[in-house]
Amino acid sequence: IGMEKFFNIKCRQSDLTPNCVILVATVRALKCHGGGPLVTPGKPLDSAYKQENLELLGAGVCNMQHHIKNANKFGVPVVVCVNR
C-alpha cells in the first residue's frame, strides 16, 4: 500500500495518526531514477551502479525530493534513510 492510500484510507478508517514518514532509498535506486542504465535480472550490474557517479545520484535526488514534498503535504515530519 502506498503512502497516500495509507494516509487517505487506512488512517481515516482506523483513526491512526502517524508521527512521521520514513522514506527509505538506496544509492542504486537513486542512480536508477537519475537516468542510470536499466537493471535486468540475471545480467551483470552496469558499472555505473558499482562506481561513484555523482551525476546520476544528483539527478535521482530530485526524484526523492518530489516524494518528500508529497509527504510534507500530510503535515508530519519526514525522515530520510539512504542505504548503500
Image (tube, rainbow, N blue to C red):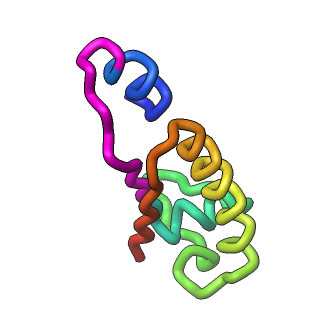
Horizontal and vertical percent position of residue 56:
71, 72
Q: On screen, 31 above or below 40? A: below
Residue at x 32%, y 20% (from the top left corner): 10
Residue at x 59%, y 48% (from the top left corner): 67
Q: Is residue 16 magenta?
A: yes
Q: Is residue 23 magenta?
A: yes
Side of 71 relative to 1 (left or right): right
Side of 63 relative to 43 (left or right): right
Quadrant in the rendering for residue 22: bottom left
Horizontal and vertical percent position of residue 23:
44, 54
Q: On screen, 66 above or below 12? A: below
Residue at x 53%, y 60% (from the top left corner): 29
Q: Nearer the viewer, residue 3 or 53?
A: 3
Q: On screen, 16 above or below 75? A: above
Residue at x 49%, y 29% (from the top left corner): 4
Q: On screen, 76 above or below 3? A: below
Is residue 38 visible to the viewer in this orientation of the structure?
A: yes
Q: Quadrant of the N terminus?
A: top left
Q: Nearer the viewer, residue 75 or 9?
A: 75
**Segment tinted magenta in the rendering:** 12-24
View extreme (top): residue:
13
Horizontal and vertical percent position of residue 64:
61, 57
Q: Nearer the viewer, residue 46 or 19?
A: 19
Is residue 42 visible to the viewer in this orientation of the structure?
A: no
Horizontal and vertical percent position of residue 2:
44, 31
